[in-house]
Image (cartoon, rainbow, N blue to C red):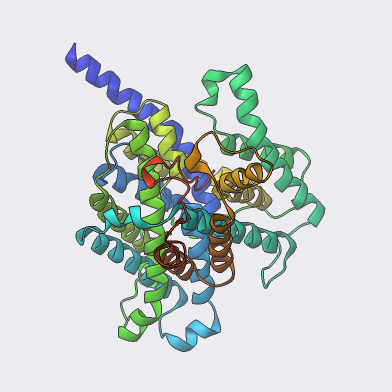
């Protein structure tokens, strides 16, 4: 009986992993496009990162992979790597420089774990976290507006603008409406057909039905033979990197490593609260570093522990690490099964998905509490009050993230928060909304 139960448990966890893998591959493709490395890079990373972190990470039930914040900053790295400014500073090719940055990101995360920095997450104020998540959301929206309209140096997606806007809008509609309808009329299927996947299928079918004259997706970077693989690795590997290249890549790698640290450990707090377990934070950082380095080696993009994917595993009753590992493994299977179908998806579909991703990253809860407070409708919890100073910190972090730099925003406003509380507001310190252990979570990808 014990063996039968164990086998049943294994099959259930594998089935849950299969369901989550559809979310992982859909978002992986979208976030790969957002990063500038392409859909295939995002999908292959979704498989690799989920597989490694689920097997070796410090959060037992989880699913990591490309996330919106990581992909938004990766896009900055990719844009720099292909710029004239980068070519003047490094002798590496664009792809080699990108790989170097992502490899260094993985190395820094491993060092963070080895030096036991996981405990420092509790010192970052939630007002700062809220601000930088809002900044990431705005960066995602701005990037997709540029792609849709062909502004800001971005080439517009091909085809009539009205058609592409309609496709993006339809995608957003089905992402929101699909799960509601499925839960009402087919609740059992709702688990296995997430809104993102449903939207891709429906809008793609409609575009094919009406022969929409728009740009369609492609799997650039897909490998078809051993010769392709050998050539690809030779082009990617930064074997001629020198110290000056490392110095140029360093700030970008540090930015991504800090972001992965925040993204991962905030998600782990959410999962710990749901499971009643406690993440081994330093082990988790080491696993994230190893996974991101492996993704970099195959031309992928960096990621972090993913809130929605991890929550799906927990809510569907996953009990084994196997669930997250299967989510990663099934991604590889799906890449080969659906690669021919992928070219039927309009590119504007991914613009719609990324607009939804930006919405999910956006943290409007403090603003809502602040507005209710202005009208005398305070929160039921006294520690949830949001005043003028908290809103200033959130807005300031958001603006610096969008207009200047993520690291400067997080580190600068964290230091300013503690300085202000120790000096200017010693008698009435600025509250931090929620203590980290009480945080409900930061949604990273939709």
Q: Residue furthest bottom?
A: 88
> In the displayed structure, does residue 262 sit left or right of residue 375?
left
Q: Quadrant of residue 92?
A: bottom left
Q: Quadrant of residue 403?
A: bottom right
What is the x, y in percent for residue 173?
70, 38
Vertical relation: 229 (above or below) 20: below
In the rendered image, the quadrant that contains the N terminus is top left
Q: Is residue 37 visible?
A: no
> In the displayed structure, does residue 109 sit left or right of residue 341?
left
* Residue beneath the point at 28% across and 22% down: 9
Closest to the observer, 227 or 135: 135
What is the x, y in percent for residue 207?
73, 42
Q: Residue furthest top?
A: 1
Vertical relation: 47 (above or below) 299: above
Closest to the observer, 335 or 12: 12
Closest to the observer, 251 or 415: 415
Q: Residue furthest left?
A: 2
* Residue beneath the point at 67% across and 73% down: 153
Q: Is residue 68 visible?
A: yes
Q: Quadrant of residue 294?
A: bottom left
> In the displayed structure, does residue 177 sit left or right of residue 36?
right
In the rendered image, the quadrant that contains the C terminus is top right
* Residue beneath the point at 44% across and 72% down: 95
Q: What is the count of numbered marks?
A: 0
Vertical relation: 436 (above or below) 155: above
What is the x, y in percent for residue 239?
30, 77
What is the x, y in percent for residue 257?
37, 63
């Amino acid at each position: 009986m014990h063996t039968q139960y164990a086998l049943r448990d294994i099959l259930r966890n594998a089935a849950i992993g299969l369901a989550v893998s559809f979310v992982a591959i859909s978002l992986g493709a979208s976030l790969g496009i957002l990063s500038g490395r392409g859909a295939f890079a995002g999908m292959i990373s979704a498989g690799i990162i989920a597989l490694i972190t689920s097997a070796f990470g410090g959060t037992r039930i989880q699913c990591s992979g490309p996330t919106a914040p990581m992909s938004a900053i990766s896009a900055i790295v990719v844009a720099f790597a292909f710029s004239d400014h980068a070519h003047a500073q490094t002798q590496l090719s664009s792809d080699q420089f990108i790989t170097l940055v992502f490899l260094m990101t993985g190395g820094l995360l491993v060092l963070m774990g080895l030096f036991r920095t996981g405990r420092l997450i509790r010192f970052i104020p939630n007002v700062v976290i809220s601000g930088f998540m809002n900044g990431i959301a705005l960066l995602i929206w701005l990037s997709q507006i540029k792609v849709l309209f062909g502004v800001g140096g971005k080439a517009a997606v091909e085809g009539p603008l009205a058609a592409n806007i309609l496709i993006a809008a339809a995608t957003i509609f089905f992402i929101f409406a699909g799960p509601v309808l499925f839960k009402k009329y087919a609740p059992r299927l709702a688990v296995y057909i997430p809104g993102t996947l449903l939207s891709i299928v429906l809008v793609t079918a409609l575009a094919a039905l009406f022969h929409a004259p728009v740009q369609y997706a492609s799997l650039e970077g897909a490998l078809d033979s051993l010769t392709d693989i050998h050539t690809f690795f030779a082009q990617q590997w930064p074997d001629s990197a020198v110290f000056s290249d490392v110095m140029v890549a360093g700030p970008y790698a540090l930015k991504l490593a800090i972001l992965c640290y925040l993204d991962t450990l905030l998600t782990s707090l959410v999962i710990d609260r749901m499971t009643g377990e406690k993440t081994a934070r330093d082990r988790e950082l080491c696993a994230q570093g190893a996974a991101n380095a492996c993704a970099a080696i195959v031309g992928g993009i960096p990621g972090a522990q993913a809130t929605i994917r991890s929550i799906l595993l927990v809510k569907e009753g996953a009990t084994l690490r196997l669930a997250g590992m299967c989510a990663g493994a099934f991604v590889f299977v799906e890449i080969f099964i659906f690669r021919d179908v992928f070219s039927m998806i309009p590119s504007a579909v991914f613009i719609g998905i990324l607009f939804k991703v930006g919405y999910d990253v956006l943290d409007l809860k403090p603003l809502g509490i602040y507005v209710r407070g202005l009208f005398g409708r305070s929160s039921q919890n006294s520690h949830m009050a949001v005043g003028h100073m908290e809103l200033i910190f959130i807005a300031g972090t958001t603006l610096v993230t969008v207009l200047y730099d993520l690291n400067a925003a997080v580190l600068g406003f964290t230091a300013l928060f503690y300085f202000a509380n120790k000096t200017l507001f010693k008698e009435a310190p600025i509250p931090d909304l929620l203590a980290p252990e009480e945080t409900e979570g930061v949604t990273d990808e939709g």
